[in-house]
Amino acid sequence: MNDQTPVMHRRTFLRGALLAGIALPLAGTLASCAAGGASSTSSADSGGAKSAKNPFGVAAKSTVAASIFNGGYGTDYVDFAAGVMKKQAEGVVASVTPVTNVAQSLQPKFVAGNPPDLIDNSGANAIGISTIRNQLAELSDVIAANNYEGTKIADTLYTGVTKPGTIDGKLLVLNYVLTVYALWYSKSLFDANGWTVPKTWDEAYDLGVKAKAKGKYLFVWGKEAATYYQTLAIASAIKEGGDEIRLSLENLEKDCWSKPAVQSVFKGMKKIIDAGFFKPGGAGTQFTAAQAQWSNDEAALLYPSGSWIENEMKKQTKTDFKMTGAPELTVSSSPKLPYEAMHSTAGEPFVVPSKGSNVAGGKELLRAMLSKEAATNFAKTRLTPSIVKGTVPADGFGSTALVSQSALLDAAGSNVFSWNFVDLYGTNTDQLVVWNTFLSGKSSVAQLTKSLQDITDKVANDDSVTKVKVS
């Protein structure tokens, strides 16, 4: 999702505005007990002499075990960084293992005390932060080190991008990707039909009428990604009702899902569902297959997602689709935050377990990923910027989606927000069930609200779960 040259000079909002609230994007299983602080020592903390060229003391020709979530970004961008590392770091090599279910695959390794050296803890089944925060190495020395080009890494990053992974003052997670959330559409399809991208839920309904007349749907969804519509709903409610909505949800407040702004969004979405403008069968459709119904078949007009969507669907997108992002919907024409306000944050959380056999190597591979060479490769091949500045040209490498991200960020200015309660407390799995039911037209707004509040209250009332107060 850059003292940049032509594109990034327009992203000056990042100076203090990227992350409006506390962010801890480690999704996954809810912990059953509180955890302590991070461990910063390991038998593998040293293996070679530390120097300016070797800031972490990684042993020459050692091997780094990396487990990387195999999702929308794939894993070969880490293989590329490993190649950069091998050239720069005395023959240090990486063994990169793709993982789809991070918690199931790696949680037993944490329990056994033999986790990999670097983990991309991402996806719907990532490991909940409470379960591993006391087993993570601090990463402040990574951003304090120089990159392979000789510049201090901290000076090459967008402002604010380390906030999501900073917990109790310690940088435990480094989020690698700058993610932009938007309502995605085919500009070529809209232009051909003279359609205008809707700004409100009422306008979306009106577009749904026009889509139906053309034999198309307004929205489509897949079972594993039903909560993409929760993300859309939350962003819409925050824009409509202001920051108090974000804080209410983040702090697990009683009746937070009953706030008027949230309810108005749910009602707007329900009207569209009841009109039959969602393509039926999503609860039984694998999510990339559902996305292909949008990007390849053009069976639906709009799809809410993060900026990984273009890369994820690049092999299943119609020629000349011209994928483009638009701001998420508001309810009224006079919301508390402007229509152009947007949900954006640093994502794709990387961690270095403190009990890995090569902690220094895990940090070195992260350092390689943060080199300009590796970060530029990521932006070019994934059509999404990393947290490293100066890697995206004005033409977005020919990507309309990437160019539109720049335009969205320009228009948003300082009106950028994010939230983390879903990921922090690991509620996505339970919420998927609720949202699949709602999108299928099998529950009311009242039932949706009660189900979501029950999930929230369960966490709020569990004294064994460490809460994070967001202000």
Image (spheres, helix red, strand yellow):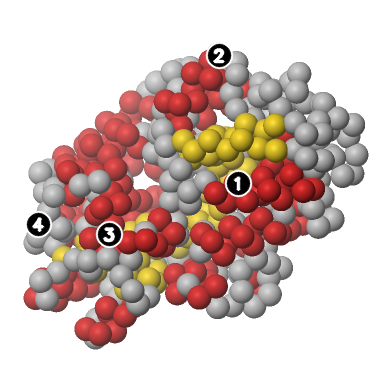
* Image marks 1 and 2: residues in contact by CB distance under 8 Å: no
Q: Residues within 10 Å of mark 3 (few under 14, many from 20)?
A: many
Q: Residues within 10 Å of mark 1 (few under 14, many from 20)?
A: some
Sequence-earlier tag: 1 or 4: 1
Q: Nearer the viewer, residue 265 or 110?
A: 110
Left or right of 215 in this view: 365: right
Q: Secondary structure at mark 3?
A: helix
Residue located beneath label 1 in the image: 79
Where's residue 403, x and y in %? 50, 74
In this rendering, does residue 411 appear at all? no
State yes or no: discs 2 and 3 in contact (Cβ < 8 Å). Answer: no
Circle 4 residue? 274
The dot on residue 240 is none
State the residue at coordinates (75%, 23%). Answer: 44
Three-letter amino acid code at the position of disc 2: Ala
Query: How far is mark 4 from mark 3, CA to CA?
Result: 23 Å
Look at label 1 and name its amino acid: Asp
- Report, in whole angstroms, how far the alpha carbon at label 3 lies from the one at label 1: 27 Å
Q: Is residue 55 visible?
A: yes
Q: Amino acid at mark 4?
A: Asp
